[in-house]
Image (cartoon, rainbow, N blue to C red):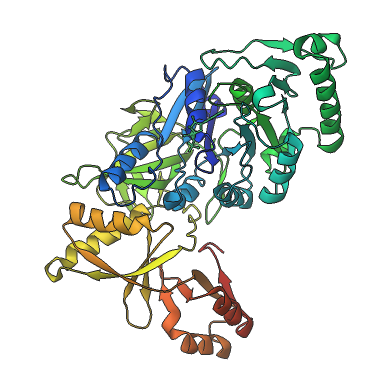
């Protein structure tokens, strides 16, 4: 197959949702359609079980699963689909933000009863900032939930999206009869049988036809006609360009558990979702069909076996082809590296591959060369725009508990930070190290892994920080900035890249500081 055809047939995306909305179930149903798995239950949920906060076996279990589900690739109607796993638990939110830099589009899953939930809001915000095309799937229609119009309103308001339904539910919960597919103009009746591969659909191109009354009853048919009239009156016509530019989000309804409405979603996805998109580097925009290979690291996974400290670095291929055993330039280190066993990922296995194309993910064995955001090329000195850091929510001083092992501690902390487990800051005032995490569980993970993988011991001390903000001074030489640095000296730190960070101890103090120093900007991410 031609190189450009390989690119055209690839769709690399992530599914985002609040925990329990049905991401794992939907993933599994998509894989079943692709024939990549043969039974339900094959995809393990990467959720941390409730109440398992101190259970290290649970942490290890989770890490194991998260390697297994990092990338799930399958073929459907000649299209190569790569699903990138986006951990749902709030303790792993950073990981999910970073994965969003490697997807070309997303599917947002929403629970029909719970509506838009907190984590979905955060993740959609990141997608919106990056103009990532989104399709919304409203799940669990077999249960009582919110009225479809009410939910569409909520999605528009809370997620700040502009939606247009491409399918519409006929009843819900106990009365759920099926969906009308606006995109394909047919009716699919709900039977509650999840084992069916392909559902039978009935073409109804004319809504006025009596056929509809026969299928779902007169009352439901009239109701549907009214609702669809309203849909056409209120929501814009679907426009693929607007979707691809992130300006319009189509919505589907269904029930992942019952495998209902999933085929409609998948068929539409395959036909509208973007092929691998161009990516901005610091110097230029790189197109996927360029001849020379480029790619970047968006995730690093430590080996589960503490005796072998090698890691798996996940590379998203942006342009050209990636070949096994060919030397590539590691731009940050300025040296060439060859990879003899790059892994590709499939639903239930990983395999060594000779060649991979834009949109694909390869896993490279790494002994400490990579960190998140690193770029590989065929020689061009080019850096993909950094993956932003977001302010952590929990902060603690980290202390060395075993003076004989300070080297090990340093190395361990360094590598765990490269992996993106947490963020490290150094206080300006006294050079003390502060670790910031998104979820409190991460502190225990770090302590445990330092001990088991690096033989180092640490203790923590609480530190009252409300938010870390990245400081940008209009004029670093100004009196205002000098005054700020003097007055706030106790609250200033450097992140790993040496960028200046201000630790605000409350929302109030952040506001006061902002007011007092109007020429200084306080950013909530490291990318500005
Ligand atoms: P995740 O946390 O988003 O990955 O959610 P899961 O896929 O693990 O689903 C959470 C729970 O909701 C599980 O008990 C599923 O069986 C259930 N579930 C998923 N989809 C549906 C659905 O369409 N209908 C109903 N009734 N339950 C569902």
Position above or below: 280 against 458: above
Residue 1 can be seen in this image: no
x 55%, y 26%: residue: 256
In the image, residue 411 lies at what x, y percent?
A: 23, 61
Q: Which quadrant holds the C terminus?
A: bottom right
Q: Is residue 477 above or below residue 106?
A: below
Decide which of 97, 154 is in the foreground and name it.
154
Q: Is residue 514 above or below residue 63?
A: below
Image x and y of residue 184, in percent? 73, 19
Res 398 → quadrant = bottom left
Left or right: residue 31 versus residue 414 is right
Is 141 positioned to the left or the right of 471 in the image? right
- Quarter-of-image position of residue 162: top right
Q: Position of residue 427 (x, y in %)?
A: 37, 77
Q: Residue at x 42, y 36 (%)?
A: 361
Where is residue 293? Give x, y as percent: 44, 39
Q: Is residue 527 above or below residue 277?
A: below
In the image, taking residue 304 as reference, residue 296 lies left or right, namely right
């Amino acid at each position: 197959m031609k190189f450009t055809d390989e690119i055209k047939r690839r769709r690399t995306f992530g599914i985002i949702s609040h925990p329990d909305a049905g991401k794992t179930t939907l993933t599994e149903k998509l894989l079943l359609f692709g024939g990549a798995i043969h039974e339900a239950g094959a995809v393990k949920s990467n959720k941390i079980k409730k109440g398992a906060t101190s259970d290290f076996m649970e942490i290890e279990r989770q890490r194991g699963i998260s390697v297994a589900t990092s990338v799930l690739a399958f073929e459907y109607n000649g299209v190569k689909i790569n699903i990138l796993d986006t951990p749902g638990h709030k303790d792993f939110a950073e990981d999910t933000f970073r994965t969003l830099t490697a997807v070309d589009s997303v599917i947002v899953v929403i629970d029909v009863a719970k509506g838009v939930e907190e984590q979905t809001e955060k993740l959609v915000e990141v997608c919106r900032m990056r103009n990532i095309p989104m399709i919304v799937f409203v799940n669990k229609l077999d249960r009582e939930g919110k009225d479809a119009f009410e939910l569409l309103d909520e999605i528009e308001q809370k997620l700040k999206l502009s939606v247009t339904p491409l399918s519409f539910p006929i009843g819900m919960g106990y009365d759920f009869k099926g969906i009308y597919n606006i995109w394909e103009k047919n009716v699919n009746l709900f039977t509650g049988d999840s084992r069916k591969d392909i559902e039978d659909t009935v073409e109804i191109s004319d809504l006025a036809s009596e056929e509809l009354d026969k299928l779902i009853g007169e009352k439901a048919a009239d109701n549907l006609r009214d609702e669809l009239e309203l849909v056409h009156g209120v929501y814009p016509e679907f426009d693929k360009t607007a979707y691809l530019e992130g300006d319009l989000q189509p919505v589907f309804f269904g029930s992942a558990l019952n495998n209902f409405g999933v085929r409609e979603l998948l068929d539409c996805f395959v036909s509208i979702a973007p092929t691998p998109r161009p990516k901005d580097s610091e110097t230029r925009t790189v197109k996927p069909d360029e001849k020379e290979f480029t790619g970047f690291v968006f995730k690093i996974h430590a080996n589960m076996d503490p005796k072998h400290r090698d890691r798996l670095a996940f590379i998203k291929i942006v342009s050209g082809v990636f070949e096994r055993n060919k030397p590539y330039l590691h731009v940050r280190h300025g040296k060439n590296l060859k990879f003899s066993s790059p892994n590709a990922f499939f639903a239930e296995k990983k395999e060594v591959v000779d060649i991979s194309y834009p949109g694909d993910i390869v896993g490279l064995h790494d002994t400490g060369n990579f960190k998140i955001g690193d770029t590989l090329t065929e020689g061009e000195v080019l850096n993909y725009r950094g993956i932003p850091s977001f302010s952590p929510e929990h902060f603690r001083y980290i202390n060395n508990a075993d003076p004989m092992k300070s080297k090990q501690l340093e190395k361990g902390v360094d590598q765990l930070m490269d992996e993106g487990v947490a963020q490290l800051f150094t206080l300006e005032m006294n050079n003390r190290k502060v670790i910031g995490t998104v979820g409190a569980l991460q502190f225990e993970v770090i302590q445990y892994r330092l001990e088991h993988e690096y033989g180092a011991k640490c203790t923590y001390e609480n530190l009252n920080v409300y938010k870390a903000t990245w400081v940008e001074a209009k004029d670093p030489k100004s009196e205002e900035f000098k005054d700020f640095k003097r007055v706030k000296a106790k609250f200033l730190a450097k992140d790993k890249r040496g960028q200046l960070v201000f630790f605000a101890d409350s929302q109030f103090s952040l506001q006061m500081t902002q007011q007092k120093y109007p020429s200084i900007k306080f950013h909530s991410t490291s990318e500005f």
